[in-house]
């Protein structure tokens, strides 16, 4: 039996999410169920304002909510029934905008049906949300222009795409310089067997380790070396401490040594006005992407992080830059 073609995978996924599943309880495995993590009152209240049908048709893994969202333009790849879009609609505010795109027509119809309900619920004079039926491998077909979004998110959907490189290329294309791709998905530690690759349920339900990645479109020459970053606070929900990823946590007013990559990210992204960044600094030449308080190397592999968290003893560095479990 030959491996399924990209067209076959698209069709199977559309049938699974559009016909076989009518609510989240219909998922055929529990692999997409993530352990509960604390969310802010702001997010809890925002979730409480979302229509029950939209929530019932939600099949993602947890929440995909980056920080510092006011007035941002956000694109959701694989937006499904629109739950994350309607949540983010409230966080970006009426001056922001959220676009959702999904290849399953039935899911897009559910999302579109409830736009007016949510705008009225949020007290917005005009919609700040739109939905397209289309493929995340070719966003141009939906008319999405170059350099048009501050953030691209995706919630356990890229694993379903036959051509993942095309998804990443398109995300890079539509992101503004300094923009971020913030996505949660599932990963395997080795190549899948042919039996698993051909298993139609495993195309629909997530498997293996779930992790959230944040990737930035950093303009060339935006920063040339390591530095020291001081968080000034003020990001809603993260006023005193910003857990950026598994390698960097920034406390308000505390100086943190950062490598050249992180310095460039903070300098060129929407976080720039929240940080004071100076060149050089103590131990800057020896940085591996973490502060100088005990982290030896930068964590980029979710399986490496999982092993570290399972190891006996403290799971994170003291007073430094390791984030919570599941954050990469």
Image: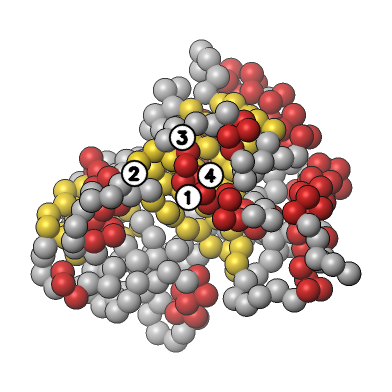
- Which picture quadrant has residue 245? bottom left
Alpha carbon distance from label 4 to label 2:
16 Å
How far separated are the C-alphas under marks 4 and 1? 14 Å
* Circles 4 and 3 in contact, beta carbons < 8 Å: no
Q: Is 173 situated left or right of 53 in this image?
A: left
Element at badge 1?
strand
**Lateral position of residue 326 relative to residue 233, left or right:** right
Which quadrant is home to the N terminus?
bottom right
Q: Are marks 2 and 3 in contact (CB under 8 Å)?
A: no
> Mark 1: few, some, or many residues within 10 Å (few <14, many ≥20)?
some
Residue 47 visible (yes or no): no
Residue density around tag 4, few if under 14, some if 14–19, many if 20 or more, within 10 Å: some
**Is 222 situated left or right of 84 in this image?**
left
Whichever of callouts 2 and 3 sits on the residue coming sooner in the sequence is 3
Reading the image, the residue beneath label 3 is 146
Residue wearing tag 1: 182
Q: Are marks 4 and 1 in contact (CB under 8 Å)?
A: no
The residue that disc 2 covers is 178
CA–CA distance in space, label 2 to label 3 = 13 Å
Point out the frontmost of discs 4 and 2. Answer: 4
Q: How many marks?
A: 4
Q: CA distance from mark 3 to mark 1?
A: 18 Å
Of mark 4 and mark 3, the one earlier in the sequence is 3
- Placement of 34 over or under 217, stated as above or below: below
- Mark 4 lies on residue: 170
What whole-number distance in Å separates the C-alpha atoms at marks 2 and 1?
Answer: 13 Å
Residue displayed at 51% across by 17% down: 124
**Residue occupying image coordinates x 47% and y 71%:** 301
């Amino acid at each position: 039996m030959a491996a399924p073609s990209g067209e076959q995978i698209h069709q199977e996924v559309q049938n699974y999410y559009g016909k076989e599943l009518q609510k989240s309880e219909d998922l055929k495995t529990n692999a997409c169920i993530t352990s509960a993590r604390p969310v802010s009152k702001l997010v809890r209240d925002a979730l409480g304002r979302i229509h029950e049908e939209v929530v019932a048709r939600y099949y993602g893994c947890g929440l995909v909510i980056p920080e510092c969202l006011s007035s941002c333009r956000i694109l959701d790849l694989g937006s499904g029934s629109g739950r994350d879009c309607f949540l983010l609609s409230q966080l970006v505010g009426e001056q922001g905008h959220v676009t959702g795109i999904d290849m399953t027509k039935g899911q897009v119809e559910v999302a579109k049906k409830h736009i007016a309900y949510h705008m009225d619920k949020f007290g917005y004079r005009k919609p700040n949300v739109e939905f397209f039926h289309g493929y995340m491998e070719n966003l141009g077909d939906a008319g999405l222009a170059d350099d048009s979004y501050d953030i691209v998110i995706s919630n356990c959907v890229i694993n379903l795409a036959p051509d993942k490189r095309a998804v990443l290329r398109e995300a890079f294309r539509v992101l503004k310089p300094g923009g971020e791709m913030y996505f949660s998905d599932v990963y395997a530690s080795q190549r899948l067997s042919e039996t698993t690759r051909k298993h139609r349920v495993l195309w629909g339900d997530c498997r293996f380790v779930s992790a959230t990645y944040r990737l930035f479109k950093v303009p060339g020459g935006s920063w040339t070396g390591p530095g020291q970053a001081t968080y000034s606070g003020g990001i809603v929900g993260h006023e005193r401490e910003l857990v950026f990823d598994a390698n960097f946590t920034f406390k308000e007013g505390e100086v943190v040594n950062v490598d050249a990559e992180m310095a460039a990210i903070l300098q060129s992204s929407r976080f720039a006005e929240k940080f004071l960044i100076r060149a050089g600094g103590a131990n800057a030449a020896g940085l591996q992407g973490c502060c100088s308080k005990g982290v030896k190397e930068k964590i980029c592999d979710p399986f490496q992080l999982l092993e570290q968290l399972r190891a006996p003893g403290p799971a994170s560095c003291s007073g430094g830059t390791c984030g919570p479990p599941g954050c990469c």
